[in-house]
Image (tube, rainbow, N blue to C red):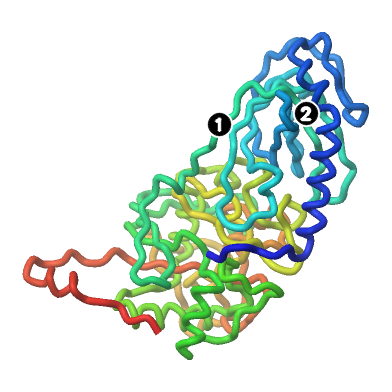
Amino acid sequence: MTGGRAPRGGTLSLRVVIILIVALLALIGAQADALTDSSARVVPAAVETQSAPPAIWTRTEPASCVEPIGASKSAFALFTNAPQYVEQLTGDVLEITAPLCTDITKGGNRARQTVTLMLIGVTHTHWAKPWPQYLVLGDVLSQEPLDSPAAATTVERDCEYCPKMLNLSGGPFVMGSVASANEIPLHSVNVPPFLLSQFPVTVGEWRRCVVAKACSPEPIGKSEFDDLPVHNVSWDDAKRYVSWLSQITRRAYRLPSEAEWEFAARANTTSTYWWGDRFVDDRANCHECGLPFDEDEPTPVGTFVANEFGLFDMAGGVDQWIADCWHESYKSAPSDASVWDSANCRERVLRGGSWKDAPAQLASASRTHDGSRTRDARYGFRIARSPAPARTADRTSEFATRTTPIP
């Protein structure tokens, strides 16, 4: 991952907006200290409030960001996707999980907070998406760091510049949905153990293959930071990368099968998205879905929250190439998670949706396709491999001393 990041498209204006909001709310910081008495709450004029009974509901909502107001005991949160029952929030307790607003422009895996607020007011910003649609103000009841599922995962890496891989134990799951004709029939699949890259392949990882003259094209993007997902690559390009990686590591890397990919994306859930049936903030990089967002390129990998398997960017960012040939439905699909191929296949499966797509295309079961030679700015990939065979006692020292050449 790269270090200091210069402001780029949309970032500078986002910083300005956040600073203006913080400055505005800081003006009422002294008054906010006196807001512990609910009967004497002082609310800024810009915040619309309603009469409400004492708090009886506690709700949990991811937000675009949350920020304490100066040295006061109050905080505000910004939402692009409306919290549930947003018009009836005032007076309730809201447990918000989000990065700090001052960190919202950072790339990579941002630290997050769980902040519990006794809500004072909610206002609609009337800004265009992906800018926040709602500003929520409340008294802070508690605040603590939020642990990521990825923090508890163990990654494998076969060389210094190889993608980080997570070992997934596999198991049975129901694949597909009834949302689209190409996602039926629902069918049971038993997935053997396999490894999947924790992130989509990045610009930095791709560039190593380009330098070795085993891959093309050069990465695109107005910034070309190493932690962006590589995009504008075809299925054929992705296959060349896994062939090169297999050669230098002596491991059998490959693209995941479609069943493996959906198993990993769902992470033991049956909902529309891995986080639930409703689209919420701070989960994925897509069109009008929330911040951070740049219309010209995806966000750096790991910007949004990992799923329960510890995998990042299984929804949004870049569409991900899959090994399987495209089929119009799952009729006669394999039940063992193997690659479903066809002779002379010209179109391959893409999963996950991209930063240019609407939320519906980020559903765990959503699928699309394109020609295997097609390069599109939305297209990237992640890699898989099967577990290494058990090593015999007489060959342990041979493997222990083997080194992997890096071009």
Judge whether 316 appears above or below 160 on screen. Answer: above
- Residue 298 in picture, x, y percent from top left: 66, 64
* In the image: residue 363, left or right of residue 172: right
Q: Position of residue 25 (x, y in %)?
A: 82, 33
219 and 56: which is toward the camera: 219
The quarter in which the C terminus is drawn is: bottom left
Q: Nearer the viewer, residue 142 or 379?
A: 142
**Relative to 302, 150 lies left or right:** left
Which of the 4 image quadrants contains residue 243? bottom left
Tell which circle, 2 or 1, labels the residue nearer the N-terminal end. 2
Query: At 6% across and 70% down in the image, what residue appears?
Result: 394
**Closest to the observer, 214 or 108:** 108
Vertical relation: 25 (above or below) 110: above
Q: Which numbered disc covers residue 137?
A: 2
The residue lying at 82 percent from left, 15 percent from top is 41
Query: Of helix, strand and loop, which one carries label 1?
Result: strand
Amino acid tagged 2: Leu
Which residue is drawn at the image coordinates 55% and 56% (left, top)? 302
Q: Measuring from the top left, give residue 393's x and y in whole percent.
A: 8, 66
As helix, strand or loop, the secondary structure at mark 2 comes to: strand
Location of residue 327 by image quarter: bottom right
Q: CA distance from mark 2 to mark 1?
A: 18 Å
Work out whether 61 lies above or below 326. above
Residue at the (11%, 72%) spot, across then down:
395
**Does the image show residue 187?**
yes
Per the image, the residue denoted by label 1 is 144
Give the amino acid type for the residue marked by disc 1 in the picture: Glu
How many numbered circles are shown? 2
